[in-house]
Image: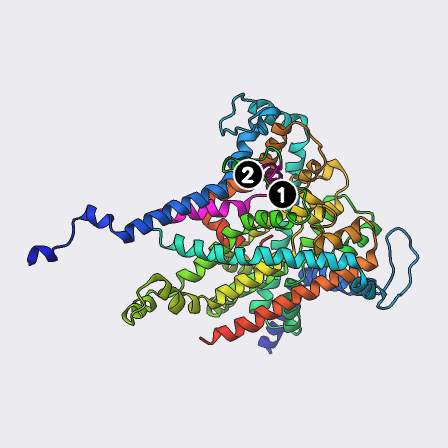
Amino acid sequence: MATSRLQNAQTRLAYLLVLPATLLILVIYIIPIILVFLASLTDYTLVSDYFEFVGLENYRTMFDDEVFANAVGNTFFYAALFLPGAFVISLILAIAIQEQKQFRSVLEVLYFLPVTSTLAAMALVWAALMDSGQGVINNSLETFGIPGVNWFGREEVVLYSLAIISLWSIIGFNMVLFLAGLTSIPQNLYEAAAMDGADHPIDKFFRVTWPMLGPTAMFVAVTSSITAFKLFDTVAILTQGGPDRASEVFLYLAFLEGFEYFNMGYSAALSLFFLGIIFLFALVQALFTDRNVHY
Amino acid sequence: MADIAAPAPNWLDRLRPKSIGRLVTTILLFLGAWVMVFPFIWMISSSLKPTDEVYDSDFSIIPKTFKGWDNYYGVIFEQPYLIFLMNSMIVCLGILLIQLVTAIPAAYALAKLKFRGSTILFGTVIAAITIPINVTSIPLYIGLVRVGLLDTYFAMMFPFIVSVFAIFLFRQFFRGFPDSIIQAARVDGFSEIEIILRLILPSAVPAIAAFSVFSFVAHWNDLYWPLIVVQSQDKMTATLSMMQYQSAFDTDYGRTYASATVVTAPMVIAFLFARRLFIRGITMTGVKG
């Protein structure tokens, strides 16, 4: 009887302990998600209180809209530029730095520095470095006889420029993730592989490192993809989607529709599309990490 | 025969191809590091220069005319940067404090106490981790407009005061705490609150420290949400202030980069002082920013 009273008291306490967090999760996550879904079925704008249900109209508009197609296209093109670099460069750096004995921690700090810095502030620096007239980058290209590039002024270049800045800001981050993965590979696997004749660094990489790095590699790939789809800061500060919508990426479009034009209903539909993509990545990650647990 | 098999002297050993390869790798790594660090060097160097020297075609790291004192004085005392920095500090600290106060008790209950609905709650926490602010921003914004709280510290902190990630992280961490110790403490007459404060919290310091760094850096560097809810200069955060420069706001370029330095310096300096903690904290979620 005493234990059951204790049990009751403990249960009551448990509810008390989770109450603040639960209420806040309700107000900050659950209700807003329901509201976003409902809003996406209306023509609600912040400007007028009157609105009506329009069914799937917003979604139909979305898939017919050239501006939407352009933003999705830009986002995928940018991701295709950004992701291979974000993955391969970071992996090579991690392998190279791991073999450094005395300089490892210095190098780690130097490469990680951009990750902690405020991207909004550093974007201004990159704008100056990439200035078409007097920027350091164009000046050094010209000393090698290569003509300067109009980094932010040309439609076919601007996404490359943004990808370069993003790479600079994420490489150290992914490198640290890879380093953690590399450190956890048991050294005796390399010794065993060496006995089997895998002496060459490239042999070692494909026979030991790469297979053992599977879960880390998957993790880096998925999280970098999510980062790619979240591109916002540098666009807002440097290009505002220009020139001529060439750098208008998905999240920036959703921001404009919602908070510049106040088309809340339409922007809600865009947000849910975005959430769908994020869920897709989360699903991929969940499926693959499960499978990888077994070896 | 014996002298052929003798090991090569040490200095010769170092000149072997393998070592040369390693030397080349080291040089390349430092060249790469120079590229990574150069924007910071350029920024600091420019923040010490007069305007016409910032875009000088023959760039030199050391300013020819030193205007650093004027530039930083201008940013800190003539422009409202002290207010911007204070706003960022208030918002980041406020968010972190409430996150810890809401997450730790919930995480303890989920890890160590039995109650009906705990599975649903934990499932909700996991699902909510994948929802970024960009998706819920519209209803949160409309709600804040309706209650007339736009452009307040409350609005700037509100979406982040419960961290589902912190609940998840701390719950995993608390589960590893031995039940036998908790039982013994209960027998000794400790209340659950005392158990949390005197047993669980001290053991969770590494996890709490790492999460704190993660949260602080993420919200210091956040541009998206302040851009939506901040309207006046009084509430502007340091990061948001960088938006002003997108439209030739200040034609004094030296001063512009002094302000960029002032905005990014707190996080960079803190990182240099607590490198391990920062690297662990920031890479904890796997998603940058």
Q: Nearer the viewer, residue A24 or A208?
A: A208
> As drawn, is A54 to the left or to the right of B55?
right
Q: Report if the CB atoms under discs 2 and 1 are less than 8 Å apart.
A: yes
Residue B209 x, y percent position in the rendering: 52, 52
SS assignment at label 1: loop
Q: Label 2 is placed on what type of residue?
A: Ile
> As drawn, is B208 to the left or to the right of A158?
left
Q: Nearer the viewer, residue A90 or B266?
A: A90
Residue A13 x, y percent position in the rendering: 64, 66
* Crowding at mark 2 (Cα within 10 Å: few <14, some 14-19, many 20+): some
Q: Which of A283 and A201 is in front in this view?
A: A201
Quadrant housing the N terminus of chain B: bottom left
Which label sits on residue A151? 1
Residue A127 x, y percent position in the rendering: 62, 39
* Crowding at mark 1 (Cα within 10 Å: few <14, some 14-19, many 20+): many
Which label sits on residue A137? 2
First to last magenta residue range: A103-132
Q: Nearer the viewer, residue A9 or A213?
A: A213
Name of the residue lying farthest toward the right: A50
| Above or below, B90 relative to A219 | above
Residue A154 x, y percent position in the rendering: 67, 45
